[in-house]
Image (spheres, helix red, strand yellow):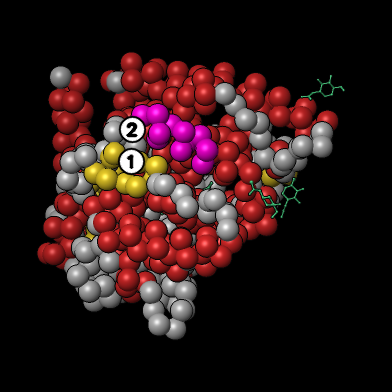
């Protein structure tokens, strides 16, 4: 019944607005798209879950071309699916396309009013937060110093996999990545119970893209109509505060004491930052948002990628054999018992497997919505400041113009004779962009690739991987694009010689 009221309201209002809006839009010549009945179609699109959104956009692409407009919510959403247009926008006009739209009502709460890297508008606050992250915690030399953490996590993971042989692996991958990011964020090794608790607290935030999304349509109305959901949603933020604030405060003391085994953590870098616009330090609330962002951005993406890559390794035994041969070759030389991260650069086939995994199964099929800093013409069409700009990541990596038989899993395509490294940042040309491109490109790219290489190499080296049933590569949209039927394997320790 509540939905019914909302639809009635929309109908009345849109009848009043149609003549005005369609005139206006025609004059500006937005990219083509389905007929727009303001608010009604916005509402209908907003109700579509992400699962339905991507195929719907793909159908529209066949009709209207590589740049289209769809009315989602109250503003026009532009969808770009060609590599060259993405390059024109994100790289050649990088500064204009680096903005973000105003935060949705739910995002506003979880991001402390956009004091977070991903949701921050393009400006001095974003620049400060992002630069500090990339030059401190994610700096290549700092990443190296976390080698002990990675080894610790690898041991936990190997242990868990051995104990629970023959079941889904995704939960163990997830726990491993989560432990690592929690440690990088809060510095201390937390116990399993604490880690599970934080992990639980993160879930609803991820879901704010899905289930809570509907709350963002006309918040002033949904706050009345779906009051219970709003309460539930706000309650989750409260829980987050209750669990994370003690961790954050404890860390402040550790930082001041600076014992000899002190390792810098992400929280430590946040206390002294001074916001350029507001001329003040970050509040605890904002620090919570930045910490949860750090964990959210890093865990599910990497876990998803790891699962897809291992799934293909299980599905195609020749890939596993070739990988094993490469690892053996390197370890014979170094005489180590496991793959240390220093030797990863000596493994081109491993690198190719990771890249092929990210191309064929990008964890994010769409970039976070971008916005332009001012109205601009792209490919002859107006991209309006008050719209969102979305990029179809998966379609770019599957473009048959660049990739022969794009749906096949063929790591060899990344092994070129000259030994030239594939440019995953797309600075000269975008051939795929699992991490985005341009100024908003994922700052965690180095950490993500290092983690994937380190874990894939060691998992293949330590265990022989076999599927229990046929590996099914069907996708399902959650926070990231996951396997609909999670990977189930039987593993046996390899006899080391
Ligand atoms: C395989 C793993 C990962 C993938 C596929 C991935 C992918 C992405 C993508 C597609 C974006 C959006 C770019 C855009 O909007 O243009 C993004 C943004 C971001 N990622 Fe990642 N990411 C991964 C891992 C990580 C890790 C490990 C971290 C950090 C710990 C991280 C932190 C971030 C942050 C902070 C942003 C927001 C950047 C901004 O708006 O300026 N990501 N990532
Ligand atoms: C978009 O912005 C223009 C000004 O650039 C404004 O006139 C128009 O009303 C806005 N449209 C919507 C749907 O907010
Ligand atoms: C981490 O790297 C340092 C310096 O390169 C090295 O001494 C140490 O043994 C490494 N630790 C592990 C667990 O690999
Ligand atoms: C920091 O030092 C103070 C005084 O030496 C001590 O009481 C406190 O327990 C220390 N805190 C931590 C977290 O090590
Ligand atoms: C990051 O923030 C810390 C704390 O304010 C500061 O000491 C450091 O210089 C900053 N780094 C950069 C590159 O701005």
In the rendered image, residue 13, in percent from the top left (x then y), is placed at 21, 37
Q: Indicate which disc, 1 or 2, sits on the residue closer to the N terminus.
A: 2
In the rendered image, residue 474, in percent from the top left (x then y), is placed at 19, 47
Q: Is residue 132 visible?
A: no
Horizontal side, residue 45 vs residue 125: left or right:
left
Circle 2 Cα neighbour tier, 10 Å, few/some/many (<14 / 14–19 / ≥20): some
Closer to the camera in the image, 443 or 112 = 443
Q: Quadrant of the N terminus?
A: top left
**What residue is pinned by disc 2?**
165
Residue 276 on the magenta segment:
no
- Check disc 1 and report its element: helix, strand or loop: strand
In the rendered image, residue 106, in percent from the top left (x then y), is placed at 41, 32
Region in magenta: 154-165
> Are the residues tagged 1 and 2 within 8 Å (C-beta)?
yes
Determine the residue positioned at 12% across, 64% down.
Answer: 63
In the rendered image, residue 2, in percent from the top left (x then y), is placed at 20, 21
């Amino acid at each position: 019944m509540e939905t019914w009221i909302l639809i009635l309201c929309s109908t009345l209002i849109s009848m009043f607005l149609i003549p005005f809006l369609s005139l206006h839009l025609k004059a500006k010549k937005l990219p083509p798209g389905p007929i727009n009945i303001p608010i009604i179609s916005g509402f209908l699109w907003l109700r579509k879950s992400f699962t339905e959104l991507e195929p719907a956009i793909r159908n529209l692409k066949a009709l209207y071309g590589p740049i289209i407009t769809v009315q989602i919510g109250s503003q026009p959403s532009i969808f770009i699916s060609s590599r060259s247009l993405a390059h024109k926008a994100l790289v050649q006009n990088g500064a204009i396309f680096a903005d973000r739209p105003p935060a949705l009502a739910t995002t506003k709460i979880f991001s402390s009013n956009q004091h977070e890297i991903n949701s921050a508008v393009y400006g001095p606050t974003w620049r400060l937060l992002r630069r500090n992250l990339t030059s401190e915690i994610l700096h290549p030399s700092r990443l190296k110093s976390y080698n002990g953490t990675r080894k610790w996590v690898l041991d936990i993971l190997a242990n868990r996999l051995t104990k629970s042989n023959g079941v889904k692996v995704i939960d163990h991958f997830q726990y491993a990545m989560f432990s690592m990011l929690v440690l990088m964020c809060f510095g201390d090794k937390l116990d399993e119970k604490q880690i599970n608790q934080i992990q639980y607290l993160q879930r609803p935030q991820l879901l704010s893209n899905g289930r809570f999304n509907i709350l963002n349509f006309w918040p002033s109305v949904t706050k009345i109509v779906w009051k219970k959901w709003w309460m539930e949603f706000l309650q989750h933020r409260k829980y987050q505060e209750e669990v994370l604030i003690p961790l954050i405060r404890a860390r402040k003391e550790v930082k001041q004491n600076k014992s000899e085994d002190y390792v810098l953590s992400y929280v430590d870098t946040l206390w002294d930052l001074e916001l350029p616009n507001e001329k003040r330090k970050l509040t605890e609330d904002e620090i919570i948002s930045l910490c949860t962002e750090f964990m959210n951005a890093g865990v599910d993406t990497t876990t998803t990628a790891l699962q897809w890559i291992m799934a293909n390794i299980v599905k195609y035994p020749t890939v596993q054999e070739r990988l094993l041969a490469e690892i053996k070759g390197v370890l014979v030389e170094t005489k180590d018992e496991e793959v240390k991260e220093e030797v990863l650069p000596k493994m081109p086939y491993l690198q190719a497997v990771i890249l092929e995994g990210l191309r064929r199964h990008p964890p994010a099929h769409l970039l976070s919505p971008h916005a332009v800093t001012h109205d601009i013409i792209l490919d002859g069409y107006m991209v309006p400041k008050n719209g969102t700009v979305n990029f179809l990541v998966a379609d770019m990596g599957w473009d048959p113009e660049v990739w022969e038989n794009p749906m096949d899993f063929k790591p060899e395509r990344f092994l070129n004779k000259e030994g030239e490294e594939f440019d995953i940042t797309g600075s000269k040309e975008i051939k795929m962009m699992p991490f985005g491109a341009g100024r908003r490109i994922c700052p965690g790219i180095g950490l993500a690739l290092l983690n994937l290489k380190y874990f894939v190499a060691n998992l293949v080296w330590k265990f022989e991987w076999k599927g229990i049933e046929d590996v099914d590569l069907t996708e399902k949209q959650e926070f990231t694009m996951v396997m609909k039927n999670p990977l189930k394997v039987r593993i046996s320790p390899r006899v080391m010689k």
